[in-house]
Image (cartoon, rainbow, N blue to C red):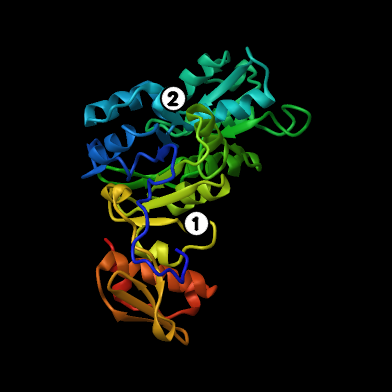
């Protein structure tokens, strides 16, 4: 959101993109149900360009994810779904030859991809696995974490342990009943036991974005996500424009405090905004930033809302002021009403 624009509206976020890459949880659905306006907006985008769905959730295969999306009304095929286990195979192929035995912590999504890639999955460290691939599944228990720990013990290969690839490090996962522990918490348990860290395939690391760009032949994709620390940071690392949608995990509070690298190009209330002209941040008098009718400025260490305007535009203006100031959020006085903006 650069300053010093003379126009009040720019092009829609989708303009200039040759593919849409969308997160799932918190963007397309919450629990089993579709988020309002998501299906129609993504089907509209799919009429003009490829739409890929990037998920860190390793519990399901691409086919099962695609079947769920079709049930919601999306025109989707399995190849449109890019999973963190698929990205993990990119890392695994560089470390372990085809045909090797690989220990699985997780569900169907990892097993399917290992077999497609020519590996032999196992659940037991006693089978002498050449690597461990760990991902989330609702039924992952202590026994699976223990098997990974046994396989990864120091000295099992060249004194340092066999390769360990985590599909993702999400600390939480949104489910129908609320926010639950994610794969990062399970990986942390194994880390505590073995004293080392895995390679990571999913967001915010770049392998999953490389897999998507290659599959869809995309040079200028737009990433849509609900989490700054995975979707937006990952897009930034991959050199991809991004839009955050306020229908999932991160809201105004997280956006106002976002560090460089986690700041999206667009802030959307829902996916209808993908196709609508995006309001530009303009420089006003006395150091004000104007977005629509909202006006915000920095007065010493205080963020001052000069004119409320639309709540979402107020949030966009406040983010611009804070981000352009170069000052960390804890040094600023932020009015409480801004934390409820845009939600």
Q: Label 2, on which residue?
A: 109
Give the side of residue 161 with respect to residue 295, left or right.
Answer: right
* Vertical position of residue 230 compared to residue 95: above or below: below
Residue 144 in view of the camera: no
At horizontal 26% and vertical 48% (from top left) the residue drawn is 272
Residue bearing mark 1 = 262
User: Residue 304 versus residue 144: which sits nearer the camera?
Assistant: 304
| Sequence-wise first label, 1 or 2 | 2
Task: State how many labels appear.
Answer: 2
Which marked residue is nearer to the observer: mark 1 or mark 2? 1
Residue 28: percent from left, percent from top: 30, 40
Q: Position of residue 270 (x, y in %)?
A: 28, 51
Q: Is residue 44 above or below residue 244?
A: above
Q: Quadrant of the N terminus?
A: bottom left
Q: Secondary structure at mark 2?
A: helix
Mark 1 → mark 2, Cα distance in angstroms: 28 Å
In the picture provided, is 11 more to the left or to the right than 212? left
Figure quadrant of residue 92: top right
């Amino acid at each position: 959101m650069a300053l010093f624009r003379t126009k009040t509206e720019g092009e829609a976020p989708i303009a200039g993109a040759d593919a849409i890459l969308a997160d799932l949880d918190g963007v397309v659905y919450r629990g089993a149900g579709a988020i309002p306006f998501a299906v129609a907006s993504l089907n509209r985008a799919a009429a003009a360009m490829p739409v890929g769905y990037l998920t860190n959730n390793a519990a399901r295969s691409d086919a099962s994810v695609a079947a769920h999306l079709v049930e919601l009304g999306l025109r989707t095929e399995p190849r449109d779904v890019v999973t963190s286990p698929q990205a993990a195979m990119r890392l695994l192929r560089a470390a372990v030859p085809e045909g090797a035995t690989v220990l699985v912590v997780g569900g169907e999504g990892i097993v399917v991809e290992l077999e497609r890639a020519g590996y032999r999955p196992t659940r037991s460290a006693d089978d002498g696995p050449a690597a461990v691939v760990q991902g989330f599944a609702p039924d992952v228990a202590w026994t699976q974490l223990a098997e990974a720990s046994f396989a990864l013990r120091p000295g099992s290969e060249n004194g340092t342990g066999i390769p360990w690839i985590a599909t993702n490090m999400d600390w939480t996962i949104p489910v129908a009943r609320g926010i639950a522990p994610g794969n990062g918490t399970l990986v942390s348990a194994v880390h505590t036991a073995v004293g080392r860290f895995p390679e990571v395939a999913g967001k915010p690391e770049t392998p999953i974005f490389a897999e998507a760009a290659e599959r869809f032949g995309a040079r200028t994709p737009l990433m849509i996500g609900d989490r700054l620390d995975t979707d937006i940071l990952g897009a930034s690392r991959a050199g991809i424009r991004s839009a955050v949608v306020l229908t999932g995990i991160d809201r105004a509070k997280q956006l106002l405090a976002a560090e460089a690298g986690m700041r999206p190009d667009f802030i959307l209330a829902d996916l209808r905004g993908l196709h609508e002209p995006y309001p530009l941040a303009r420089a006003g008098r006395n150091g004000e930033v104007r977005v629509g009718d909202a006006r915000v400025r920095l007065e010493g260490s205080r963020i001052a809302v000069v004119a409320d305007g639309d709540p979402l535009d107020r949030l966009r203006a406040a983010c611009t002021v804070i981000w352009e100031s170069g000052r960390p959020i804890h040094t600023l006085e932020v009015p409480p009403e801004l934390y409820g903006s845009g939600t």
